Image (cartoon, helix red, strand yellow):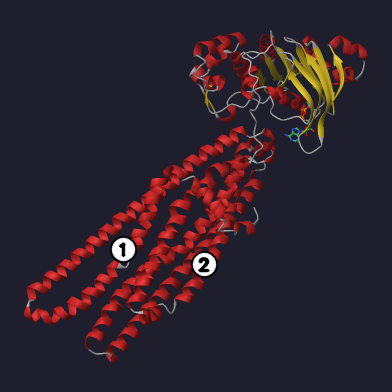
Amino acid sequence: MSEGKEKKIFNFGLLRRVFQFAAPYKRRFYISLGLAILLAVLSPIRPYLIQLTINDYVKDGAAAALVDKIRFIDIVIWVTVIQIGLLLIESAFRFWFSFLTAWLGQSVVKDLRVKVYRKILGLNLSQFDKTPIGTLTTRTINDIEAINDIFADGLIPIIADLLSIIAILIFMFVSDWKLTLVSLAPFPILIAATYVFKESVNKSFIRVRNAVAALNAFVQEHITGMPVVQAFAAEDREFNKFKKINREHRNANIKAIFAYSVFFPVVEIVLAVGTSLLVWWAATHAMQLEGKSAEDLIGKMISFYLCLNLLFRPLRVIADKFNVLQMGMVASERVFKVLDNDDYVKKDGNFAPEQVKGKIEFDHVSFAYVDDRYVLKDVNFKAQPGETIAIVGHTGSGKTTIISLINRLYHIQKGAIRVDDVNIEEFQLDALRKNVGVVLQDVFLFSGSVLDNITLRNPAIPRERVVEAAMLIGMHDFIMQLPGGYDYNVMERGSSLSLGQRQLLSFIRALLYNPSILILDEATSSVDTESELLIQEAIEKLIAGRTSIVIAHRLSTIRKATQIIVLDKGEVKESGNHEELMKLQGFYYKLHQMQFEKQVQG
Ligand SMILES: Nc1ncnc2c1ncn2[C@@H]1O[C@H](COP(=O)(O)OP(=O)(O)OP(=O)(O)O)[C@@H](O)[C@H]1O
């Protein structure tokens, strides 16, 4: 996002939308606003009481002390008790106010995060191709946290501070406008300093945030890619890059700290000058006045001194709060962009069969991931229930794309894909996907137990069925050898298991869900002969009785396929069974010689 956009503070539409999320907590929201008003009204009372006490009791009391010492002491004690009482009430309200605004912020954050995550879960896969993972993580974690600050440290506290500033100013002006003007004479300096400070801190904050994002992205990426870094002995180079990003992070923070270090002494100096002017004016004028007027002025001077302190307290932090508000607004704009993304998977079909028979048809299908760069061109094929279709072709020919389209991970631009003669667009998405089992080459495992990874935490699948399926696939003995067996904790992304083992686990998963259609992307990695046999047998068991579409890398799978589709640059070059295609001596024949014959030799 450009910095120009970051500057936009008061986008009221945006603010209104943020506050709509507080609607379920309306009562607490209004209570916090009420408290803000109450605190504002309370703020000038203490200075006023002091003024009153000094004017009406202390100076009179001095005279009265000669007459009625006991009565004078009584009054002073009472005034002190009232002062303490007021302070306690104010503190209690302030605690309630801070707690409520923080509570509101956290509740809004909780609701928003659920909404954003639900949205992310439903986004079309093409969105994940376009948006880096780090960005979506930032939206769900950091940006939403910044929205919390709009409530806890932003708008409502700013309203509370402004109201108390206004209340104190009114009191001061009503009490003595000349004295007010004199003591506030250095204020324009403060306003200018606040403005400069706000701008400078804001710029530093943007730099800090970018630096944090860069640090996060760098560490995340390099820990994931550590095998590559170490294998290519790139540690030193990467370490130096890290140091550079880290230095930028420190520099950005130091800029912000510098602004704070200049601003706070400036505030203190302005306060001191204001106080000196107040004392100087009151003292010189008191000397020129006589009797009651002179004594009143002294009372006012003391209460104004308190007022100045009360004024400066919110002023010191208001610039900071404006920054927090501004950050929150920028963050909310980004979060709403995710919420407003209408490229989500539309579950609009209503055909929801329990179990499909498994007929698949690609009817003149053309597809492009981006604009009109078609990666599949006019693809046609049919698979009858129970048949196995093997897709072969060079790398980048569109094999993975074909299998991604069957369960509607992407929408096709031209043609139609039908399952049981019904266009897949007319299926209810869940129903379609329940019928299409997918086993990918790079099996993604979540951190959790082997059992959790097989069932995907579906409580409807009992452990016994998992064991049964594992036995059928031939994985049971292997799993039992792991420490903890089915409860063995698979590390993040399954790195503690080999590629072949991971694929076998996902075979068990597919078998359990018992889909009528199976999509299988065979792992290309070479495994030892024993595992190879295990995998071959498992594949046979897996595809038996289902319509299977296999991106085949094994000659054994290809030979057994009912039909082989030969893809080249997104087009079907040839199709038929192994014998037919070999006889043709065309594209498949050459591919076979190049890719598969070495398997026979090997
Ligand atoms: N998410 C994506 N966004 C944009 N283009 C993509 C995307 N995925 C694949 N492509 C492009 O589509 C074309 C077909 O890719 P696909 O992954 O289907 O090939 P493949 O035959 O499965 O290759 P391989 O055998 O290497 O897995 C390639 O040119 C690829 O660059």
342 to the left or right of 461: right
The amino acid type, in three-letter code, at marker 2 is: Phe
Q: Residues within 10 Å of mark 2 (few under 14, many from 20)?
A: many
Is 478 drawn above or below residue 180 in the view shown?
above
505 to the left or right of 97: right
Rendered location of residue 184, percent (x, y): 41, 77
The amino acid type, in three-letter code, at marker 1 is: Leu
Rendered location of residue 431, percent (x, y): 62, 20
Is residue 363 visible in this depiction of the protein? yes
Q: Residue furthest bottom?
A: 288
Q: Residues within 10 Å of mark 1 (few under 14, many from 20)?
A: some
234 to the left or right of 564: left
Q: Residue at x 21, y 74 (%)?
A: 53
Q: Residue at x 73, y 26 (%)?
A: 405
Q: Residue at x 78, y 11 (%)?
A: 561
Q: Quadrant of residue 427?
A: top right
Cα separation between marks 1 and 2: 30 Å
Whether tag 1 and tag 2 are in contact, CB under 8 A, the answer is no
Is 447 drawn above or below residue 186 in the view shown?
above
Rendered location of residue 342, percent (x, y): 65, 38
Q: Secondary structure at mark 2?
A: helix
Q: Which residue is mark 1?
A: 42
Q: Which residue is mark 2?
A: 197
Q: Quadrant of ligand 1?
A: top right
Q: Secondary structure at mark 1?
A: helix
Is 147 drawn above or below residue 264 in the view shown?
above
